[in-house]
Image (spheres, rainbow, N blue to C red):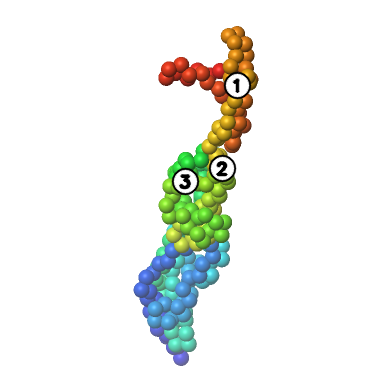
Amino acid sequence: TVTVKELQGKPVFDNASKTVCESTAFNLPATDNKGATLVWYTSNGASQHASVSAGITTQTVYYAAIVATNDKCETASNNRTAYTIYVDKKPNLDLTSTTETICQGEQITLSDYVNNNTKVGTVKWYSNENRNNEITDLTLTPRVGENKYHASATNGVCTTPAKADLTVTVNPIPSITGISASDNGKICSGSSATITVSATNATSYQLYTVKGDTYEAVG
């Protein structure tokens, strides 16, 4: 007696595709929309484990079949359902510079520091290293001293962001607090005088003589 079993039907999916992050493990569906248990194959007909532990780097199509049961055989090879895996690239965040020095009162625009030649997806900036305090206005005036800004880039389903940090040092504007000359500034022609300058936030200074609207450096 020969019993001929009928074949399983074609697997059914509402959406026969998914998007994964490149080189990241993912699972193919264990069942179709009707609850039928599936087995998987590659485009050349080789058996494919449902858990793709090594991930993939380019768009790939797999083929689903319903497994054999006691009364039915596995879906025929020409009746398998194609299932497409799309791949989002991992973000790669590159800054044009990681340090900047400016003067008090000057502005910076954080987006200007992202290298436009790098495709990074969506870049967000944060004021803290934990990256949970987002900066929404990217043009800002940093305070005097050292300021750190933290960038993260994400791309599609790649949830682990690329990270980069920018340190902006703001130098205070120098201020002259006093100026005096020896002999109360009264000297004879051809004599010399010592001028003393007191200043804050300064490492050096330049003296000028004033002739009308013209300033000429001394020394």
- Report the residue at 53% width, 52% height from top: 150
**Residue under circle 2?**
169
- Report the residue at 59% width, 37% height from top: 201
Q: Amino acid at mark 2?
A: Thr
Percent from the top left, x then y, of residue 18?
A: 42, 66
**Residue under circle 3?**
141
Front label number (3 vs 1): 1
Quarter of the image where one finds residue 25? bottom right
Q: Amino acid at mark 1?
A: Asn
Label 2: element kind: strand
In the depicted view, which residue is nearer to us: 159 or 219? 219
Badge 3: few (under 14), some or many (20 or more) residues near its Cα, within 10 Å? few
**Residue under circle 1?**
184
- Report the residue at 47% width, 85% height from top: 69
Badge 1: few (under 14), some or many (20 or more) residues near its Cα, within 10 Å? few
Q: Amino acid at mark 3?
A: Thr
Percent from the top left, x then y, of residue 17?
A: 40, 67
User: Marks 2 and 3, Cα distance to the nearest angstrom?
Assistant: 11 Å
Label 1: element kind: helix
User: Marks 3 and 1, Cα distance to the nearest angstrom?
Assistant: 42 Å
Percent from the top left, x then y, of residue 66?
A: 44, 78
